[in-house]
Amino acid sequence: MKTKKFDVLICYRLDRISRNISDFSKLIELLQKYDIAFVSIKEQFDTSTPMGRAMMYIALVFAQLERETIAERIRDNMMQLARTGRWLGGITPTGFKSQAITYYDNHMHEKKMYQLTSIPQELKMVKTLYEKFLELGSLTQLESWCLENNLRTKNDKCFDKSSLKLILTNPVYAIADKVLYKHFQDLGMDIANHEKDFDGNHGVLVYNRSQETKGKTSILKKYSDWIVAVSKHKGIITSVDWIKTQNLLKENSKKAPRSGDSQVALLTPLLVCAHCGSKLKVTYKVNKGQILHHYYKCTLKERSRGSLCKTKNLNGKQSEEIVVEELKKLPLPENKLFHTLHAKKSSLSKFKENQDNKRNSLKKKLMGYEKIISNLTLKLAKSEGTVTDRYIIEEIEKTDKKIREVKVQLERLRDRHKAIQLENINYQVVEQTFRGLSLLFTNANFEEKKKILQVIIKNILWDGEKLEINIYGGKE
């Protein structure tokens, strides 16, 4: 739009380009700003008149209303289907697969529904996870136990705390009995079945547990929004153990320390284990509430209790001092990155000079072709319908094609010229930042220092002996 690559935007129907009035309004404003026409084939609005624009917005209002109405009907229908205990789709939980079942409705029409069927080997593993969690008492210890015993997910990946929690909080494994009914009732959930249907044999399915948010992970809804239905599959975890598991998880979450609040560890988000690629986490030595010292430890080493990675721990204070001192050296002439930066700027300057020469050469070509067209046009005017007309017209067309090709090349050179200018500005900004780095660090508080490091450093590799600091745009 901004570079005038097109003059008109065409869509088949209005709701194909947008069903949101706010977004569409912004788009139309942009089109008008850059003098680009908008055409909808189906509706054929005349956007040059106030009435035409008004009709266009009215049509969009109805398109949005239709979309929201359809979405609401689908949600209502899914809620109603949920009460039947059938599987409504999505990723099946570990231990189950989705199986189609044919049935006949009240009008004797053949229908198809889906239900969960068990995968015995996976369910055996799930049962072990519940038993071990209740034995060990924490997700961290359960994660370590899984790594030590090479227990893997159904996608053949190592279990981490989030994947374990997903299994341990899923009601699909609980046996539907009177205890579980009472538990769900106390939490205020919408229970689709009568108490007598909780027969101590089948499992349950819980619907409407979470909602997807734009750009974020799904978040749990209030218990009162959850719909519980007795399913066709069999439960494998007793209601007492499942409820005990939920209570223990809640209790542990209250005790868990908050991450990211430390005012000591400066390198936490940047450190990576060179051997296994895992992040390094900070660990503190505390005495009577006071932090004596801190060090960084490979998360895989900690999770697997040293069975999958044995990288030595990294002294926190010492490593932070080394990194800061190295960064303060960046603007000094003897520094390797300083020379790299100047070499790139010099190379960019030569490239720009070469591009300028090409552009001047193309401009001369363009002027020459335009002169040829002018001369041929004069000849065509003087020929007065002779047999040479056809040859003159052919020459004009050939030269016109060359003119178009040269213009395309000039357009590309203009784009490259803008990119070169931007890259040159970037190098200047980097150089100025490095020159003021020492003073910046001296005056910055802890959080500001952390942000400065994250802007400059891509990552820091630790192999147990030495640190390798990888900087954006270079390697030091």
Image (tube, rainbow, N blue to C red):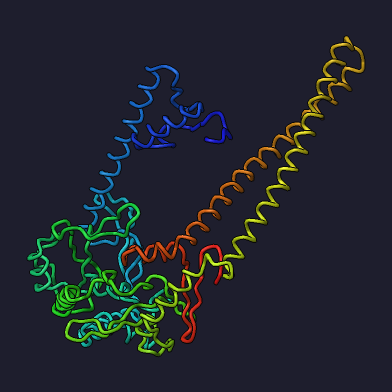
Q: Nearer the viewer, residue 188 or 449?
A: 449
Q: From the viewer's perspective, is residue 69 above or below residue 176?
A: above
Q: Quadrant of residue 396?
A: top right
Residue closer to the observer: 301 or 465: 465
Left or right of 220, for residue 366: right
Answer above or below: position of 78 versus 26: below
Query: 286 above or below 271?
Result: below
Q: Residue at x 58, y 51 (%)?
A: 424
The residue lying at 9 percent from left, 74 percent from top is 179
**Residue at image coords 35%, 54%:** 215
Percent of width and height locating residue 107: 26, 48
> In the picture shown, does residue 109 fall above or below 95?
above
Task: Measuring from the top left, give residue 369's x and y in whole percent.
Answer: 81, 29
Residue 473 position by quadrant:
bottom right
Q: Position of residue 180 (x, y in %)?
A: 12, 71
Q: In which quadrant of the rendered view does residue 451 lie? A: bottom left
Q: Is residue 77 left or right of residue 393?
A: left
Please identify the residue farthest to the top as the structure is shown.
Answer: 384
Q: Nearer the viewer, residue 140 or 317?
A: 317
Is 318 placed left or right of 210 in the picture?
right
- Point out the residue furthest to the right here: 387
**Can see residue 215?**
yes
